[in-house]
Each structure stands twice: as structure tokens, then as C-alpha cells.
Image: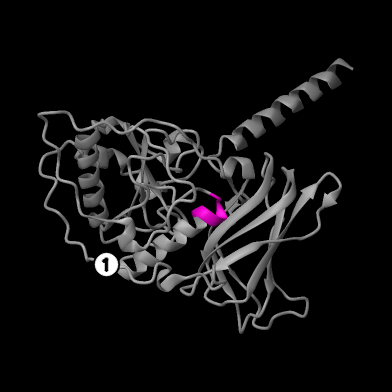
Amino acid sequence: MVNMRLKVVWAAILAAGLSATAFAQDYGAPVRVGGRTAARKYFSPNRVPSNGILFEIGPTDPVGASFDQILFQGEMPAAGVGFEASVETAAGWSAWTPGTVKRFPNGRFWGRVDFPAASSGRIKVRALDQGVRGRAEIELYSIEAALRSVSAAEETGGAQPPAPPEGEPVADKPAVIGRAEWGAKPPRNGWDAHTPYRFTQHHTEGRQTRSLAESIQELKVIQDFHQNGRRWNDIGYHFLIDADGRIFQGRPEGVIGAHVRNQNSGNIGISLMGSYHPPKNHTLTAAEKQSIKRLAKWLMSRYGIKASTYKGHRDLGSTDCPGDIVYGQLGELRDSFTAPGIGADLKVERFEPTDPKGPLAPVDGS
């Protein structure tokens, strides 16, 4: 009897530890199959089967903590693909729950499935034929399970950023393409001011873009995913940098972002556009490094931020971000912030906004 009680207590301790680990994930826990990420390429058969199922993912590994939604984003060249998901409960597999999918003309898309109740077990996801012409090829850049109340939460409050110290020179601000220039949508509910005193490095887990037009398209997708998929007030980062070193303004740096769960106040989010982690393994370019250095030097001079506060996202939460490739170079980047001779301003193409929706309006018309 004593041994049985000890086993029950030990099982409870293990379960609590597993839950704590999973809840330590940032905004969501990555979905895995056989210990590997479920974010990869998937292909439908050459002929769509009569049941309309293009392919199925899972059963996945157990998530290990409560979730009531899955969020995913990636690329699907062919239109007409829908998604639905099922979760494992004590009573067995749930009914299939249809998802929301928003696809853009360039093939980028995001999706979300909201379940009626929380679960913590395995997941199955399947892609459905909703008018596909030919074979469907879908690449998931990321897929995660989360609680709606956690993934949509944003910090509020804070203080206005201070003025530069009198008598101290402020480093030149690098060229930044503003929100109006890339066609950003306004925040849903305004912003909350904060006093910047640290900065965090991220990657977007999306496309690595080089041309100005491609980068603007990707920015619109990211903002739409953050606002309508994650239900955030605005794009989460303050600055985004493409492979050619262009710097784009996300949220103004004087307001609280949404990039590190529970640690956004005072924290400037800088994100590289791309996926610098397996299986993508994008290369960190010299132009990106140069822009990070110049941006960091200006932030340090403008707000009195210390170079030592420059961290990777994974230093502040349980996540792979900003990817192994970038994370392995953070020390070198941090050292360069205080080194002399950062270099001249990068030349940046100018962009004249036209239609507020831009050339990348979602195919559903929203």
C-alpha cells in the first residue's frame, strides 16, 4: 500500500514537472511528431482521394500542457486547401474541428483551429480539398499549440521613454522604412508607452526576403498573422530586418511590443526575416549583421540601453527563437555594439505607398 502511494505521488510530481516545462513555452508549445517538429513540407497524392483528404499530420507527440488552439503558418502555392484538427481526450479522439485559413496571392498563409475545450494530449491535423486544382504542396514554417488566453495576452502600462541625456551626442539613426511606407495597418486599440532599457533578438520563422517588394509582402503577412491569427493588437516586433539589411519599423520603439511573453515592458524586439533554425537554416548575411549593429548602437545611445541586455529570445523563454544559426553569433554581435567603426548608413530603396491594402490583400477580401 505504501509503495502504491509513493508511486501515485511520484507520478503526480512527474506530471507537474511536465506541465511546468510545457507552460514555460513562450506563447505556445511547438507541435512535434516522433520528437521532430511537425513544421515541414507535405504533399497530397497526384489525384485527390474521394474522401477529400489531401494529407494528415499525426497523431503528434503529447503536448503535455493545456491548450485550446493550434496556430500554424507557412506557404501553399495552390489555393483551395482547408484544415481541420482533432484532439485526444480521456474519452478518445474528438470530432474534427474546422480551422480558419487566410491565404495571400503570393502563397503565404496562416491558419488557426480553436477547440471548444482545453486538452493536453495528442493532436491530428488534416488538409482538405476545397477546390484544389492539381497536386497540393504545403510547407509549414511553424505549428504550435497554445491557450487562447495566453497566446493573445499582451502587457500593458509602462512609462514614456526618456529624452536623451543632455550634452551627450546621440548616434545617427540608421535608415528605417516606416509603417506608412510599407503599408502597416493601425493597431487595434492604440499602444501603451514604455521606457526601453533592453533588447531581444528574434527571427520570424518565415520567408527570408531580399527585394523590397518581397519584404513588404512578408511584413503584411506577419502583421495580419499577429493581429488576426494570434489576436494581438499589432505586429509584435519593433524592428524587422531583411536579408539585404533593410530595417523596417514594426511597432514604435516607445511602446510595448508583443515578442517575449511576460517580458515585453521595456524590451525592444528586433526580428530577422527568415528561419535561422533547422530545417530551413537560412544564412545570417553580412548586411543583416551590419544593420543589427547600427540599430543597436543607436538604441544604446538614444535610450541608454546597455549592450549586455542584448539577449536571444530563448534566453528569456522556452523557444528555439532566434534559431541556432543566429543564437550562435549573438556574442559576436553584442561585442560589435561597442566596437568603433560601425560603418556608413546603408542605402535603402524608398517605397511609395499606394492602396492601403497593398498588392497583398488576402484572397478572402478581408
Magenta stretch contains residue 282: no
Secondary structure of the magenta portion, mostly?
helix
| Residue 116 picture location, percent across and down | 75, 50
Q: Which residue sits furthest right? A: 1
Q: Position of residue 347 (x, y in %)?
A: 17, 61
For the point 32% across and 34% down, which residue is it?
196
Would you place residue 183 above or below residue 340 in this image? Answer: below
**Residue 119: percent from left, percent from top:** 74, 44
Q: Which amino acid type corresponds to the residue marked 1 in the rendered image?
A: Phe
Using the image as rendered, state which of residue 78 and residue 264 is in the foreground. 264
Could one spot residue 306 in this view of the protein? yes
Crowdedness of circle 1 by 10 Å Cα count: few (<14), some, many (20+)?
some
From the viewer's perspective, is 48 left or right of 350? right
Q: Residue furthest front?
A: 189
Q: Dot 1: what SS?
A: loop
Residue 49 x/y as whole percent: 74, 79
**Residue for point 66% across, 80% down:** 131
**Hey, which quadrant is residue 316 in on the image?**
top left
Reply yes or no: does residue 228 show up in magenta: yes
- Residue sitting nearer the eye, 58 or 203: 203
- Determine if residue 33 is in view: no
Determine which residue is flagged by label 1: 351
Q: Which residues are magenta?
A: 226-231
Residue 360 in the figure: left or right of residue 31? left
Whether 34 is drawn above or below 6: the answer is below
